[in-house]
Image (cartoon, helix red, strand yellow):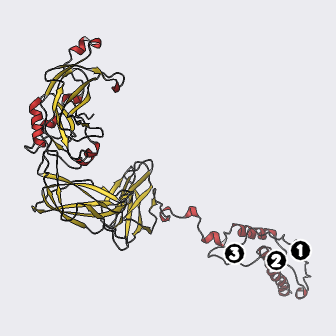
Amino acid sequence: MKNTLSAAVALPTVVAIALGGLLMAAPAASAAPAPVEQSVGGAVPVDETAPAEAPAPPATPERAPVDEPGDVETEAPVVDEPAAAADDAVASTPTADAATTPTAAEVPTAEAAVEPAFAVTSPAQGQVLASAGVRVEGTAPTGSRVVVTSSDDGSGVVVPVVDGTFAEAVSLPALSTAESYTVTVQVTGADGAELGVIERTVVVAGLPTNAAPTISTPGDGSVVEGIPYTSGDFDTGAIEITGTGTPGAIIDLDLDGIDPDVSYGYDYEPAVVKADGTWAEAGYRPYGTWRVSIRQLTVDADGFVTALPSSYVSVVVDVVPPAAAPAAAPVVTSPAQGSTVVGRPDRSQGAGASPLEFTVSGTGTPGSAIAIYGYFDDGRAAIDRYAAAARGESIGDGEFEPLVAGLAPIVVAADGTWTTTQSLVGPGTYSFAAFALTGDLSFFPTMSAPSDVVTFTLVVPTATATTASLAFTGDDGVGPWLAGGVLAIGLGAAALALVRRRGRRVSDAAAGSVRRV
């Protein structure tokens, strides 16, 4: 009887436990709409956003009679506490995405790409260039150091950063076929820290070749009179070379000695073909036979070659000394040597100035132009040395502007007379001499010997004279140009633009400064 009772009680207990376990799992199962793959070591992931169904009300089990264990089916009660615990487990379980995908904040900083603290805005990667060069532009912190390097030579150039920007024109080889190059920009911060490196590859397109220019004058095999160079080097003659070419092109001029076969340096500013297609250039060479060769090339505003240089065009020319003799030295008739001249106030210099005007007149060769140079200290000796050097009789060691006629030269009239009005900064004693200029007044005219030196005293008018002005001697610091010379009349702007292209050998008397009128 005891054994039968134990077995009868044990059987419904086992059934109740089994059924209760199934009912306890039922609420959790109903909360998950679909099966989800489970990550290792965690509870079953559940979509927390899906609404959970309300749990079923607990059922009250019926107790089976003890004496009829085999005929009773008992439902296990649903217990709320285990169901709540299951819900908590589901709520605290991370989703599959959260468990496997780190957020941006969780990515280690070392693995993130570091952007440079500067930018290159030009050129673009792979840009094709129409000329042999590229403008490298960009932005960088003020105070940083920018170095731009091109792969053609490997040398770098330091580019300043102004208001946070930098720009540099980088020349590249000019070729007839396309070629690619790498431009590198390296930036170092003001504190010495490296900010990074940016590289850009560019392609220089194959460039065309310029057409050859022409030489109009001198002709091949011609004989040309060289104009004596007015620095006193009478062994050198200047000739004018003209021709045609592509507007805007640069004319590259070469002069090679044939007879005598000498090496002769040539420093010049190249001619540029004008809009009408013509160009002109002055060449300076010792007298003899010379080969004149030219070619042309074109560049853009940055100086980058846009077309390859043309082939050379050449002529051979004999340059000979001029046959014409210089004009006779002019004569100064006023002011007279040793005279006192009352000046007139020069109102053209503006308020506060006190220069004095006076008249200079004389005689000379009709048609020649008159130039006047003045000196304070050396008088006749200095002017004689100056004139001798200009005639090629000696070589000095100073510098001076050659005497050439200006836009409104003093020309000797048909009756052989000339006159001009001069202005000096104040009263004092002055010396000067006059020269006659002949030939092409705009292209290295020939200069005569000087006139006799005239020394005179310039005073203020009596009506406006003061004790201080009457005592003025010209030596009291009246202006830096007075310390060396007085004046030069008729200095031509056109000829000066030509002669500035070459160094001059000059007389030591030319140390006096010159004022053009």
Q: Position of residue 345 (x, y in %)?
A: 30, 20
Query: For the residue marked with disc 1, what is the amino acid?
Result: Ala
Q: Residues within 10 Å of mark 3 (few under 14, many from 20)?
A: some
Residue pointed to by mark 2: 23
Mark in the foreground, 1 or 3? 3
Identify whether 377 is placed above or below 49.
Answer: above
- State whether residue 466 appears in this view: yes
Label 2 secondary element: helix
In the shown orientation, is residue 42 left or right of residue 229? Answer: right
Q: Position of residue 342 (x, y in %)?
A: 23, 18
In the shown orientation, is residue 356 left or right of residue 139? Answer: left
Quadrant assignment, res 231: top left
Label 1 secondary element: loop
- Answer whether labels 3 and 2 touch (C-beta < 8 Å): no
**Cα gap from disc 2 to disc 1, whole angstroms:** 10 Å
The C terminus, quarter of image: top left
Residue pointed to by mark 1: 59
Residue pointed to by mark 3: 44
Quadrant assignment, res 416: top left
Quadrant assignment, res 31: bottom right
Query: For the residue marked with disc 3, what is the amino acid?
Result: Val
Q: Position of residue 266 (x, y in %)?
A: 19, 55
**Cα gap from disc 3 to disc 2, whole angstroms:** 18 Å
* First along the sequence among labels 1 and 3: 3
Q: Residues within 10 Å of mark 2 (few under 14, many from 20)?
A: some
